[in-house]
């Protein structure tokens, strides 16, 4: 009797904890309510199965408890029961998988009007690249990464000239417009995760991954790295700000392009190695 009572209390406690728990998801700020709905469906199905199984266990413990003189009925097979269990299990598994497959189909189908924004991760900061006035992102290669070109952008690609470069600073996005986050890592495995956006994806060295979403409310949201990427993992945080179109355009005008960054780097290099440097004087003397 005591064991049966404990099992019933486990069910009641679990249900109450779920209903009254303060640890619910953060308010959603993107179009991915599909994911929230899928999680709710999963909770209902698994919760129902959990409740039914544990209560059945409690019933069996109480109903078939030891009694003096009672003899167990040996029944090793029950085809009817096995058939019903197989059918119910198959229906339950299908109910769990079907919503996820529908959501995954949406998740990998990027809208044609989505703007590409590149995310470049490195230990331990987030960098971003946005298309310029022509709406195109140029090519890049990790072999081109240097102090003057931290994102490894191809300087010979004309599409890169007016790309907007954001190094270890806040990323701004316009509200209500789909964004395709194209992601790569220049060192180890990272994961770009904004809880309010629901969508996330790994950044794998040597690969280009992506996910898309549409911001649905303005605000400031924290970017987390959801993969253990080294001793500075806990400090690898960033900020995504969702702006109105007017505020977004104002922010965009203040950002540097790749051409401006390259020119500034060349100017700095020229100042560090003036015409009268020792090497050049020695070369002229020779």
Image (cartoon, helix red, strand yellow):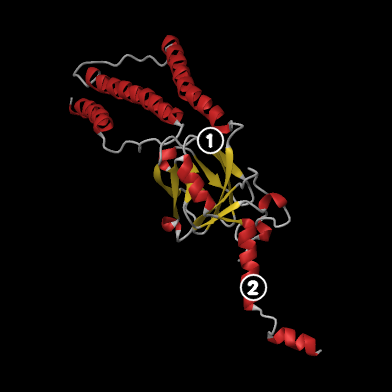
Question: For the residue carrying disc 1, how many other residues have a C-alpha within 10 Å: few (<14), some (14-19), or many (20+)?
Answer: many
Position of 115 relative to 39 (above/below): below
User: Is residue 149 shown to the viewer in this render?
Assistant: no
Residue at label 1? 178
Q: Quadrant of residue 267?
A: bottom right
Report the side of 59 relative to 278 (left or right).
left
Q: Going by the picture, which residue comes out furthest to the bottom?
A: 285
The quadrant of the image that shows the C terminus is: bottom right
Residue drawn at (63%, 76%) of the image? 271
Q: Quadrant of residue 36?
A: top left
Question: For the residue carrying disc 2, how many other residues have a C-alpha within 10 Å: few (<14), some (14-19), or many (20+)?
Answer: few
The spot of residue 197 in percent (x, y) is 44, 38
Q: Earlier in the sequence, mark 2 or mark 1?
A: 1
In the foreground, 241 or 22: 241
The spot of residue 52 in percent (x, y) is 32, 20
Report the side of 27 relative to 184 (left or right).
left
Q: Residue 269 carries which label?
A: 2
The quadrant of the image that shows the N terminus is: top left
Provide the secondary structure element on which disc 1 rests. loop
The spot of residue 75 in percent (x, y) is 38, 14
User: Is residue 208 shown to the viewer in this render?
Assistant: yes
Residue drawn at (44%, 43%) of the image? 243
């Amino acid at each position: 009797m005591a064991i049966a009572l404990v099992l019933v209390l486990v069910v009641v406690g679990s249900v109450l904890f779920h209903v009254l728990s303060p640890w619910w998801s953060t308010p959603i700020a993107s179009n991915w309510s599909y994911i929230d709905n899928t999680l709710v469906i999963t909770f209902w199905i698994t919760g129902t199965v959990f409740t039914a199984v544990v209560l059945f266990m409690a019933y069996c413990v109480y109903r078939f408890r030891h009694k003096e003189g009672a003899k167990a009925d040996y029944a090793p097979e029950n085809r009817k029961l096995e058939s019903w269990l197989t059918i119910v299990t198959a229906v339950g598994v299908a109910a769990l998988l079907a919503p996820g497959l529908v959501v995954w189909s949406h998740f990998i189908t990027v809208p044609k009007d989505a703007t590409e924004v590149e995310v470049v991760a490195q230990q331990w900061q987030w960098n971003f690249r946005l298309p310029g006035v022509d709406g195109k992102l140029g090519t890049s290669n990790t072999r081109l990464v240097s102090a003057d070109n931290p994102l490894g952008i191809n300087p010979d690609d004309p599409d890169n000239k007016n790309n907007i470069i954001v190094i270890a600073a806040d990323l701004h996005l316009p509200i209500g417009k789909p964004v395709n986050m194209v992601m790569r890592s220049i060192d180890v495995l990272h994961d770009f995760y904004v809880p309010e956006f629901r969508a996330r994806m790994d950044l794998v060295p040597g690969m280009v991954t992506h996910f898309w979403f549409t911001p649905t409310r303005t605000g400031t949201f924290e970017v987390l790295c959801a993969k253990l990427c080294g001793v500075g993992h806990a400090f690898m945080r960033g900020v995504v700000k969702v702006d109105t179109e007017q505020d977004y355009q104002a922010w965009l005008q203040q950002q540097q392009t790749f051409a401006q960054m390259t020119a500034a780097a060349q100017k700095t290099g020229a100042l560090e190695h003036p015409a009268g440097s020792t090497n050049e004087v020695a070369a002229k003397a020779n």
